[in-house]
Image (tube, rainbow, N blue to C red):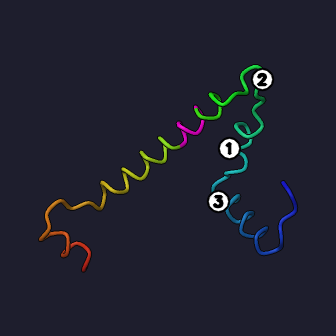
Amino acid sequence: MAELPGPLRSVVSWLEVRNGARRSAHAPVTHPVPRRTASWWYVFGSATLALFALQIATGICLALVYVPAADQRTRAFNT
């Protein structure tokens, strides 16, 4: 990783201690991509998977706060 400025370095190290993101992201980031499969289909397939995962995560968050009734909606956000 490139050298980070002091405050940013401390934030990154704080996050690393708590969730180990660098260790878990190391394998996918350093995964060798064979030259014969490095195409736009490979890129768009990965992007589609990432966006689908993001859509699932935001859908779960929305399902936790969504209230379909208009009279209950204002009561839920005013508490």
Q: Please give the count of numbered marks on the rendered protein.
A: 3
SS at mark 3? helix
Q: Are marks 3 and 2 in contact (CB under 8 Å)?
A: no
Q: Mark 3 = which residue? A: 18
Residue found 79% across the figure and 67% down from its top: 9
Question: Which callout, 1 or 2, points at the residue further toward the start of the chain?
Answer: 1
Q: Residue 34, which numbered label?
A: 2
Mark 3 vs mark 2: in front: 2
Q: Is residue 71 left or right of residue 27?
A: left
Specify start and end residues of the magenta stretch as a single range: 45-50
Which amino acid type corresponds to the residue marked 2 in the rendered image? Pro
Give the class, few, some or many, for how many residues have Cα within 10 Å of label 2's Cα (few <14, many ≥20): few
Image coordinates for residue 4, horizontal then vertical, percent = 83, 66
Give the class, few, some or many, for how many residues have Cα within 10 Å of label 3's Cα (few <14, many ≥20): few
Question: Which callout, 3 or 2, points at the residue further toward the start of the chain?
Answer: 3
In this view, 36 is above or below 7 = above
Image coordinates for residue 67, horizontal then vertical, percent = 21, 62
C-alpha distance separating marks 3 and 2: 34 Å
Q: Are marks 1 and 2 in contact (CB under 8 Å)?
A: no
